[in-house]
Image (spheres, rainbow, N blue to C red):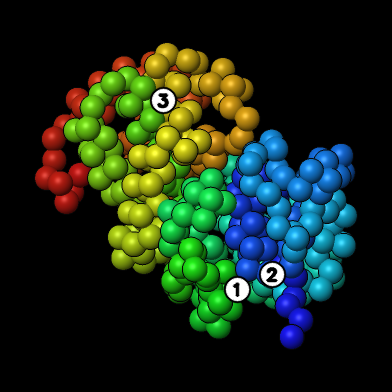
Amino acid sequence: MSRIDPVCVLGAGSWGTSLGLLLARRGIPVRLRERTEELATEMETARENRNFLPGFRFPDPLHVMYDMQRALDGCRFAVLAVPSQVLPEVLELVPAERGTGPIWVIATKGLDERTGERMSTLVARRWPEARIAVLAGPSLAREVAAGQPTTVLSAAREVEIAEAVRDRFHGPTFRVYTSDDPVGVEVGTALKNVVALAAGIAEGMGLGANAHGALLTRGLAEITRLGAALGANRETFLGLAGVGDLVTTCSSPLSRNRSLGEAIGRGTAPEAARKAMDQVAEGVPTTRSAVRLARRHGVEMPIATQVHRILFEGIPPGEALRELMERPPKAEEAAG
């Protein structure tokens, strides 16, 4: 039997753990890197992620590690599944000689809060010769961990890299398509969290199905406009990384961003709602990035702008709704 190269997953939250489970169940050795030595030891001993994915037993090929060098040793694929806010410091921890060894699989769903850059851009800046792919699509962590049918994209500019990632992750419950538009895939999977916050706020306010449908539709238009300004293919947003991820994240009670939005819509202050969550809602920092990018590129994003005002400027959701509804009417194809 031929040796199977291990896969390193950097980030032992719910998403990183679910990807580790997915691979390990197929007999692929997985090194799940946890950022604290104490938690790494606890998870390895318990054979379970009790904090983020309780109830899912680790298969034998999955091991939790703290030491970065050891986790990456001999790996052909290194998966980045940490929150976007900490990805730059995680990259700094990677030994310089390891940067161009594995194929980097971007599973982080967000934009850099300070610069608005995509995660793959941060990796490419650190290691210009790095091989990079994006793994994204409608993929709630708990459903992946439970073995529910899931379909995602492996996106890279080089087809052989996209196909290599596809072949490693594709399995009986995890179907992987390829794409040559990593820009669109990263933008879509990041900005859908902003719309999910809006959808959750509307749900918390009890605004009904009409409002939900309108937010998803107009939210997709905003994502597409900004994505196109950043160099993405508009058709990407009609696929898994656009409509697919958007509908899933805005509709499921398992979505952290939708859940956070619901709490805000019911009257909880945004900061208090964030503190009450035990995981990161990527839509919050991404909202800030999206609004900055929209201003920089002259793109109109009224939904993202009102979410930004609710989160960071203290306006009540009711006032944000009124401002959205009282905007001058336009033809749909010209509407911002």
Decide which of 115, 264 is in the foreground and name it: 264
Q: Amino acid at mark 2?
A: Ile
What crowding class fits label 2: few (fewer than 14 Cα within 10 Å), some (14-19), or many (20 or more)? many
Circles 1, 2 touching at the beta carbon (< 8 Å): yes
Determine which residue is flagged by label 2: 28
Indicate left or right for 216 with 132 as reference: left
Determine which residue is flagged by label 1: 168
What crowding class fits label 1: few (fewer than 14 Cα within 10 Å), some (14-19), or many (20 or more)? few
Q: Secondary structure at mark 2?
A: loop
Looking at the picture, how far across and down is residue 6, in whole percent? 75, 70
Nearest to N terminus: mark 1 or mark 2: 2
At horizontal 53% and vertical 79% (from top left) the residue drawn is: 163
Decide which of 1, 256 is in the foreground and name it: 1
* Displayed quadrant of residue 49: top right
At horizontal 29% and vertical 42% (from top left) the residue drawn is: 216
- Mark 1 or mark 3: which is in front? 1
